[in-house]
Amino acid sequence: MSLGSRLRAAARFARCTALTALALAGCSRVEEAQHSAPLRPIRIVPASATAVDYAVALAGLERIVGVPQQAVEYSVLHEGRPEPGPIVRFEAYLAEPILALRPDWVLIDPWQAPETTARLREVGVRVSTLPSVRSVEESIHALEWLGGELDEVERAAKLISGLRARVEKLRAASRTRPRRRAIAYSNFGGAGSTAGTGTTVDSLFEVVGLDNAMAVRGLDGHGGITFEDLLALDPDLIVVSEPLRMGEGASGDRGGASERLLRSEASLSGLRALREDQLVALPAWLFATGSHELVSAAEELARRIDALDARTRAASKETR
Amino acid sequence: MTRRDVALALGYGIALGVLAVLSMLLGSSSLDAQQLFGGLGAMLGLAEPLERNAQAIVELRVWRAICTLGVGASLALSGGMIQGMFRNALASPSLIGVTGGASLGAAFAILALGGYAPRLVLEGSGGLEAFAIPFCSFVMALATTALVATIASARGRASVTTLLLVGIAVNMCVAGVFAAIQYLTLEEWEVSRAILAWTFGTLDDRKGLHCATVLLALALATLSIPFVARELDLLKGGEEDAESLGVDVARTKRIALVSASLSASAAVAVAGQIGFVGLVVPHLIRLCGAGSYRRLLWHSLPVGALFLLGADVLQRFLLGDGALQPGVMMSLVGGPFFLFLLIRSRREVSTW
Amino acid sequence: MVERLQARGIRFAYAPGQLVLDGVDLDLSRGELVSLVGPNGSGKSTLLRCLAGLAAPLSGTVELDGQSLPSMSPQERALRVAVVPQLLPSLYDVLVEDFVLGGRYARIDRWAGPKASDREALERGLAACDALDCRGRAMSELSGGQRQRVVVARAVAQEAPVLLVDEPTTSLDPEHQVSIFELLARLACDGRIVLVVTHELNLAAQFSAAMAVLHGGKLVARGSVDAMMRSEVLTPVYGERLHFGRMDDGRPFVVPRARLLRRSQG
C-alpha cells in the first residue's frame, strides 16, 4: 500500500467518522420526534438518486412526492421509465423545498448536508440515512434494512430474492466467459480517474467475472490514472460511461468524452483493448449507481460484453 | 555575458538535464535507464523504437518532463513580471485573473464534455477533445486578464492600484460563477469530480500540443524580457520617477501584462492550478542576491523550471507514483517553505 | 544649448473645480538657480511636476526654447529635464551604481547596455555630489544625507540642461543642507536651468539668483533675493510671525518668532 492510498484511506476514515458522529449527534436529539411519525410513510422524499432507486423499488412511485432534479438522469427514473409523472423536482437538498413537499419521510445518502437533516428533524420530519454502499451485497443489505424502515418487509424480501437470483445467474454466466483484466476509466480532458477495491465498480466487475486491474495493482477506492498506468497495465477491457445526456447533439454511436478521448489519443493506440475494440460504454446512470440497481448495471455490462464477443466471433469467422 | 554568466548557464543546464532524466526515470510503471535512453534515441531517430507501449510510455514521460520545465519557467517568469509591475513582492498572476479565468474556462469545457452542450465543443472537434479544456481555459484566462486591464484603464491610464482593485473585483465575479457551477454540479458525480480534479492540476498525460502551447507562450514572454527588465527596475522608484527618467511607463506595463498573462495562462491552462511557483521563485532569486529585474527575469526561467521539476521528482521519489497532484504538493510544501523564507529574512517584509 | 524654460498660464486641478494652480507664469533661464518658495499646499510640487511634463495641466503651456514639453515622449523629455523627487521608496535590492545609472536610461541602448560614457557620467555624478564612498552599497543601507546626495547624483548623471529639484534638504543636517545647495548653485553656474522647491528660505536666499513665491496656486512675486526677502512680500504669504534681519555680510535672513508668553494674572 503506497503512502498515497494510505493517505486517501485515512481521509476516508476521517470523513466517515465525522459523518457518523454527526449522524449520531442528530439522532440522539430526535428520538421523541420519531414516535409521532406514522409507521408506514405515505409522503416520501428520496433526496438523492440512490435514494430514489430504493424508494421506487420498495414504496412505488405513488408514495413519492418529490425527487431531486439530478435523479432524473442518475436514477431508475432515467429516460422516463417509469414515468415520474406529477412528482415535484427540486434542485438541491435544502430544508425549504423539501418541507414544502410536506414529507413524512425523507431518505438521504450519508454524504448529504447534515445541516439540512438537522433542520428537517427539528420540525419533526423523519429522516433516514442510507448506509454507504460499496458492493452489490451491501446494496442488498441496504434494501433489507430499508424494508424494515418502510414497513415493507415482505416486499423487500421478494425483491431481495429476485436480486439474488439475478446475481446468481450473472455469476453462472460469467464462468462461461474467459477471464479478463478490466479497467473503469473516465476522463473529461483534465485527468483520468478509475476505481479500485471497495468501490461499486469493483463489485460490478466481480459479479460479471472481470478482474479489476487497478484493484489488483493495489488501488483502494477511487483514484487518478495516467496514460502511463493504462499502457503499463494494458487491460483486456476498458469500461467507460456513456454521455450523461444523449440529446440530439450526441448520437449513440459517438460515445462519451472518455471513450472519444481514449480513441483519439495517439499514445494509447497500442493498447490491446483499443486495438481489439474491447471497450464497453455503460449508461451513465448505471455507471454511477449506488443502489441495488447495481444488479441491472451488471446485467447491462454482461449484455454488452457478450455483444462484443459475438461481434468478435463473427469477425473471425468472416476472416476465416 | 561575463564568464560568471557562462558558468551559471552551464550549471543551470547540467542541473536541468540531471533532474529531467531523474524525472523521466520515475513513474508509475517500471522503466530502466537502458529502456529510457533507447526510447529517447528512437524519438530522435537514432535507435530502433521499443515495444509499442513501452515506447509510448517513454514519450509520455518526455512530454511530462518538458511540460513541467515549461510550466515552471512560465509561472516563475510571469510572477517576476507581475511583481515588478505591481512593485509588490506578494503579487502573482492570479491577481489579474489568470487562475480564476482558467478555472472557469476549464469548468465550461468540462460541462460541455460532460454532456451539457455537446454541440458547442464536441461537434467537429476532430479528435481534439483532449485539448478542449486547455483551449477553453487558455482563452478564458486571457479574456479575464483583458477584461481586468480594459476596465482598469477605462478612464485614462491605469494605475497599478486600480488594476489591483479591478483584478480583485473581477476575480470575485469569476470565482462566483465557478462556485455556482461547482454547486449546481455537486451531485453530478462525474462532472463535479472532473472539475475538482482540474483544480488540483496535473502534469501527467501531457503531449506535444500541450508542450507546444506552453513553450510558444513562454518564448513570446521571454522575448519581451529585454523590453521590460530595465524599465521594471526603474519602476521600483515609482511610476512618476520612472517616467521622469524617460521610461514609457504605459508601454512597459502593457508589455509586462501581456507577456505575464500569456505565459501564465498557457501554463495554467495546460497543467491546471499550480500556485506558488510564480510567487516564491522570484523571492528565491532575490534572496540569492539577484534583485534587479535584469537578472531576476532571466534567472526565473531556469530556477522556475528546476523548482517545479525538483518538487515533482522529490514527491515521486518520496511518495511513489503520482501520489499527489503538483498543485496540491506545491501548496503543501510551498506554504511552509514560504513561511520559512519570511521568518529568515525579516528585512524583506518591510519592502511591502 | 537650452536657454529658457517658459510656463504660461498653468492651471491644474487634482479634482474638478479645485484649482491647485491658477494661471501660473514662470520663466527660468540658463545659469541661474531659482528657488520656488511658498507655504504648505501652495502648489509648489505640483508646479514642478507640470514643468517636468509629469503632470498634464488643464490649460497653459510649458515650452523649452519654444518646444512644448508635454508633447514630447518620456525619453525626449528625460534628455532635457532631470527631476530630483522629494520622496522615493526605500529601494531594497538597488545598488547605488544601478540607481545612478538609472539617470542614463534615456541614453543607454537597450541591447548594448551602458557604454564607457555612461560609466563616466556615473562617476562624475557621484563625485560632484561627494558620494563616491556610497558605491557598492544598496540604497536602503545609506544614511539620509548620503541617500539625498545619491539622488541628486542621479540627476547630475542624467546630464540634462534643466534640473528640477523638489525639497532636497528635508531630513538633512545643516552641514548637508548647505552642501546640497552649494552643489545646485554650482550646477546652475555650469550653464543649467535649475529650479529648487524649498521651505528653507534662508538657504534659498543665500544660494539662489532669484526667488519665486507661490501662494494659493498663484505666483505672487518673483525677483531678486533682496527684493523677495521683505516683509511686504513674505508676510502676506507666511503670516505675521516672521522676523527679518541681515547677516554680518549684509545678506537677508528670516526667522520665525515665538509669540511672547505672558504669565496670566491671578
Image: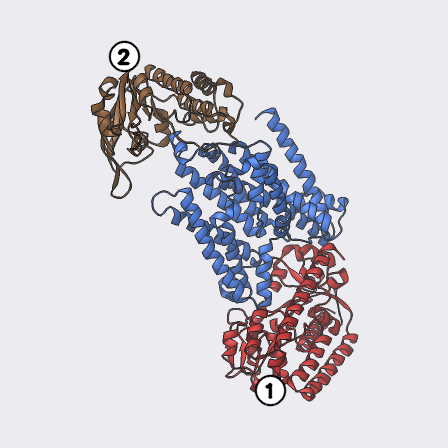
Mark 1 lies on residue: A38
Q: Does residue B251 appear in the picture of this structure? A: yes
In space, the residues marked 1 and 2 are separated at their CA atoms by: 111 Å
Q: Is residue C188 above or below residue B51?
A: above
Circle 1 crowding by C-alpha within 10 Å: few under 14, some 14–19, many from 20 = few
Q: The residue marked by circle 1 belongs to what chain? A: A
Colour displayed for chain C in the image of the structure = brown
Q: How many marks?
A: 2
Colour displayed for chain A in the image of the structure = red
Circle 2 crowding by C-alpha within 10 Å: few under 14, some 14–19, many from 20 = few
Q: Position of residue B22 (x, y in %)?
A: 71, 43
User: Which image quarter is the C terminus of chain C in?
Assistant: top left
Q: Is residue A46 above or below residue C139?
A: below
Q: Among the chains, which one is blue?
A: B
As helix, strand or loop, the secondary structure at mark 2 comes to: loop
Q: Position of residue C40 (x, y in %)?
A: 31, 32
Mark 2 lies on residue: C250
Q: From the viewer's perspective, tell me whether residue A251 is left or right of residue B243.
A: right
Determine the residue positioned at 71% across, 85% down. Answer: A162
Residue type at mark 2?
A: Gly
User: Which image quarter is the N terminus of chain C in?
Assistant: top left
Residue type at mark 1?
A: Pro
As helix, strand or loop, the secondary structure at mark 1 comes to: loop
Q: The residue marked by circle 2 belongs to what chain? A: C
Q: Is residue A74 above or below residue C95?
A: below
Residue C104 appears in which quarter of the rendering?
top left
In this view, the residue in front, B51 or A100, is A100
